[in-house]
Each structure stands twice: as C-alpha cells, then as structure tokens.
Amino acid sequence: MRSDENRPVTAPIPVIVLGAGGHAAVVLDLLRTLGREVRGCVAPEDGPASASAPLLGGDAALDGVSPDAVALALGVGSIGDSRVRRIVWERFRMRGFSFPALVHPAAALGSGVMLGDGAVVMMRAAVQTGVRIGEATILNTACSVDHHARIGAFVHVAPGATICGDVTIGDDAHVGPGAVVCQGVRVGAGAVLAAGAVVIHDVPAGRLVQGVPARERRP
C-alpha cells in the first residue's frame, strides 16, 4: 500500500485486462484515459470490453507471459460477492503479476491517501485526506469517502455511495448505489449494504442491511 499525494505512479509496461464484461469495459476505458497501452482482454468469451480490445482467450493466454512484460488490471466486477474477483486475483498474483492502482483523472484524492495494489478509483469519486483503501477495491463513479475512513480489500463502493469520516469497512463488503454510511460506523467483512440504505449503526460481518435507517434483512 502506498501514499499518493496526487496520482499513483503507474508502470510503463503494457496492461492486460482480466475479464470482458461491463466492469472490464470501464476499466479498459480508464486505462486508455490514463494513456496506458492495453494489449487486450483475457476472458473465456466475448463481452462489452472485447468489442474495443482484442479478446486474447481464457487464462491460458497468459501461459508463458512474463510478469515483467505486462501488468494486469482486474476487470471482474462484484455485486455483493467478491469471491470470483479474489480467485482470479490470487491466481495471477501467485504467478508474480502486478496490479497497478488506477485513478481516473476526474477523481479527487486528498493528501495522504493510501491505495492498495489494484485499487480502482473511478470518474468523479472523491477521497479525502487520510483514507486507506485496500487492494483490489473499487471506488465507483461519483462515490465519496471522507477523512480517515478505512476501506478493506476487495470492497465495492458502488456509484453514488457516501462513506463518512472515520468509517471502517471490512474486506469483501459491498456498499450499494446511493447508500450512506454515517460517521464512525463499523461495517464487518462480507457485509452487504443495499442500494439507498442509510447505515447509522455498526453492521456485523456477513449481514445484509437495507432501508432508512438500515436494518438487517432476515429470510
């Protein structure tokens, strides 16, 4: 994890996107906005991303490719379940591939922000001073993360969500579109905050909450 006063320094080597779906298409567009050379997408079948970049094939397309020759970008999305993202990430990290953090030029980062490897900060996201973001976490379009929040690894903060100051969000959690997590709240690992939820109390690990104010949804 590193501190970025303005933008993360990205390696000059080409990038291959893992995945070819909708999220991969957004990551591909971000890479091109940053001026990165994109070699193509690795996925078992065509998707929105492969409409504008070569589909290189499945995982076997990276057999024999040196981790020193290309970096990878995780284009596998997450809606409440990060297991597939983790599996793909770990498979290629074990082979030595790097995943640079990516920050859209239209995002705003305060001083002292810490970004884990593979973290992605999308267009119009705002991240205030002292925030720590774990590896492979997605801060999606126009979300905001306020001062000194701690966001774990493989978290998805969906478009328009608001994370207030001093919040802690555990690994693999999902913060739905337009959800609000109020000052100082603790959200456990793997918790899911439904779209539009207003979270004013701590959420235990693995729970699903929804509504205003947010309450646990039971079967």
Image (cartoon, helix red, strand yellow):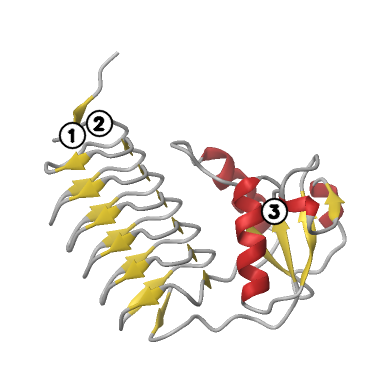
Q: Which residue type does callout 1 highlight?
A: Ala
Outermost residue toward the top?
219
Mark 2 neighbour class, 10 Å CA radius: few under 14, some 14 to 19, many 20 or more? some
Q: With 79 as the anchor, is 69 left or right in this view?
A: right
Asked whether the beta carbons under mark 2 and mark 1 sit within 8 Å of each other, the answer is yes
Asked whether the beta carbons under mark 1 and mark 3 sit within 8 Å of each other, the answer is no
Q: Which residue type does callout 3 highlight?
A: Leu
Mark 1 neighbour class, 10 Å CA radius: few under 14, some 14 to 19, many 20 or more? many
**Which marked residue is nearer to the observer: mark 1 or mark 3?**
1
The quadrant holding residue 168 is bottom left
At 73% from the left and 79% from the top, the residue drawn is: 13
At 58% from the left and 71% from the top, the residue drawn is: 100
Above-or-below relation of 57 to 3:
above
Please report whichever mark, 3 or 2, sits nearer to the chain's N-terminal start: 3
The quadrant holding residue 152 is bottom left
At 35% from the left and 53% from the top, the residue drawn is: 160
Mark 1, residue position: 214
Label 2, label 1: how far apart the Cα atoms are = 5 Å
Residue 210: give its label.
2
Residue 213 on image: x %, y %: 13, 35
Residue 56 on image: x %, y %: 86, 54
Mark 3, residue position: 18
